[in-house]
Image (cartoon, coloured by chain):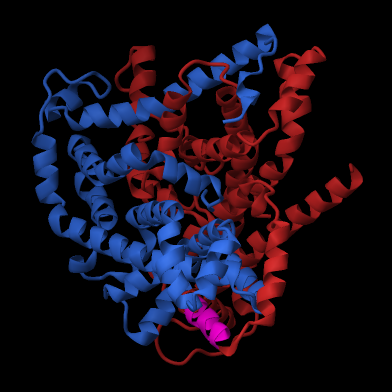
Amino acid sequence: MLSTANGASGRRLTDSVHSNATLARSSRADRMSYALLSAPALVVYAVVIIIPIVYSLALSFTDWGGSGMPHFIGFANYISMFRDPIFWHSLRDNGLVIAISLIGQIPLGFFLAYILYRQLIFGRAFFEAIIFFPSLLSPVAVALLFGVVFAPSGLIAQVIGMILHSNLFELDSFNSESTAIIPYLIVILWMYTGLYMIIFLASLQKTNGEMLEAAVLDGANEWDLLHRVVLPGQIPVFMTSAIYAIAGSLKSFEVLWIMTNGGPSYYSNVLGLYMIQNTFTYYKYGFGSAIAVVLILLSTGLILLLARGTQYLSARFE
Amino acid sequence: MSQSQRVRAQVPLLFRCSAYVALAFFTVFTVFPLAWLCYTSFKPEQDIVANMIAWPSTWTFDNFSQAWQIGAFPHLFVNSILYSVVTTVVVIILSVAAGFAFAKIPSRFTRFWFSFVLVGLLITISSSVVPIFVAETYLGITNTRIGIIIPYIAFNISFAIYLAWSFVRSIDNEIIDAARIDGAGYIQIYWSVVLPMARPIVTTIGIFTFQACWVEYVLVYMMSSDDTIRTVQVGLSMLHGQLSYNFGLLFAAVMIATLPMMVLYAFFRRQLQAGFSMGSVKG
């Protein structure tokens, strides 16, 4: 899964020869060094990431409110979550966030990368630097900037007002239950398309030039090159990108937190925010943990599904 | 670079148009908000009130000097730099060690531990802030610097190990064998052979980790009830309520908080791109 972005640089033959040779003289001291070298990283990782997640799983079956003894309440947290309309709305908004990543950021990132890689336009380094930059910004900075952009009398309202010649124009299109998430979708398109462009650019650099040359000799034009020669080779990168997009979209909520805090009402809520609100605003730690568990299960499930789907498809078409 | 970029093919008109339109549109879409942010932060308040979009009539640093004071940035910068630098150094040392062990020391445990580490690539701070908060409350280390740095290390180590492993794997075995024949143990080899050789990947890991720590917000916000241990990002988010009426000031604060990223980008764009293109989980 991960080696795809890195190019399929498989282990060299010498590696296995080497390991057999040294395995024979692998001593007690070597095993000791192995442990000493790898243990510190593994311990920090396990203690901070794995143990709390397991603990959180246990907590999700309790009514713990932050102090006192937790009481076991079975699946009650999960049941009340599934009965909560805010949960379903947050899930719907999360679905839209994933959708915009999959049909917006990734294809657009690929297309931009292709244009730059093929040097169809002069000044590649300039465009590369500009479009990638937003993905390095802090979520707080981005949220503050776009908070003003989308505010009722913010930048967009002013621009529209200028066009309509009315300086009292107020932007209220994003106040309704169904549209409140749209500004955020635009923001993540702005912020992360460049990231996917960079991923595709790195992988396109490894495309075999002779293949392109041969295709051109056969009379292929640029469009043929794109969709017949280059695109098939990029399918694994699309899949890895999709996995990153799903994992990232389900979990990130920082920008939204500061930009709208899920509002107006709960209309722009996502699951991550729903988790934070229940835990830190209402002190429902058990309930918050249950949301965390659902989040982790959802993203693992979707990723496994995607990986399976890819396997199935590539088995069918090869 | 490969020669493939130089292979010229006939470009159909429709294709050429859509390429130009896509790139032009997306560049403007990217640049315009940033440019607006930038020039508005130099704009006097009465200019902003009069016209939000217009270019400043006079350029002023007043917004910056005021934002610097209101935001109490000096100690926030100290904290941000402290957390980012300590995390980066520890992550480099630990990840290259583990990456080296996984790549070059034969062991039947590698398969298991390495997959165990890779699971961490899919877990972000925001998805496990609740469990971590609970654990830190239990240990009594919320609102302490160590309670921030340790999670930072943990959340950056998976990807760093992966990067280190893929680099160390490509180091020639003969170099390591030669050192072994000279009687060096693996730990000695790590310190005096692998770590110096791994300088390119160490730079990538370092820059990447530093960036991730610098922009992190959720964990510090949750763990800190005390202003003295907060970071630039948390300070910035708190200005939101105070300054939302005066966004010349607000944008100056955003610029101040973003300046280190701009400098980093100017000098290390290649390393950042390399890190990101090897796969990191973002929205």
**Where is the N terminus of chain A found, in terms of image quarters?**
bottom right
Q: Report the residue at 18% width, 26% height from top.
A: B49
Figure check: A159 above or below A25: above
Quarter location, residue B113 = bottom right
Q: Report the residue at 55% width, 72% height from top.
A: B101
Report the front residue among A100 and B261. Answer: B261
In the drawing, does residue A83 fall left or right of residue A283? right
Magenta region, main secondary structure: helix
Residue A176 point in image, percent of width and height: 50, 40
**Colour red belongs to chain:** A
**Colour blue belongs to chain:** B
Residue A266 point in image, percent of width and height: 48, 53
Q: Residue furthest front?
A: B182
Figure check: A57 above or below A88: below
In the drawing, does residue A298 fall left or right of residue B27? right
Q: Report the residue at 59% width, 63% height from top.
A: B173
> Which range is magenta?
A29-39
Report the front residue among A283 and A111. Answer: A111
Q: Residue furthest bottom?
A: A69
Residue B52 seen anywhere in this rendered image of the structure: yes
**Where is the C terminus of chain A found, in terms of image quarters?**
top right
B63 inside magenta stretch? no
Residue B198 point in image, percent of width and height: 45, 57
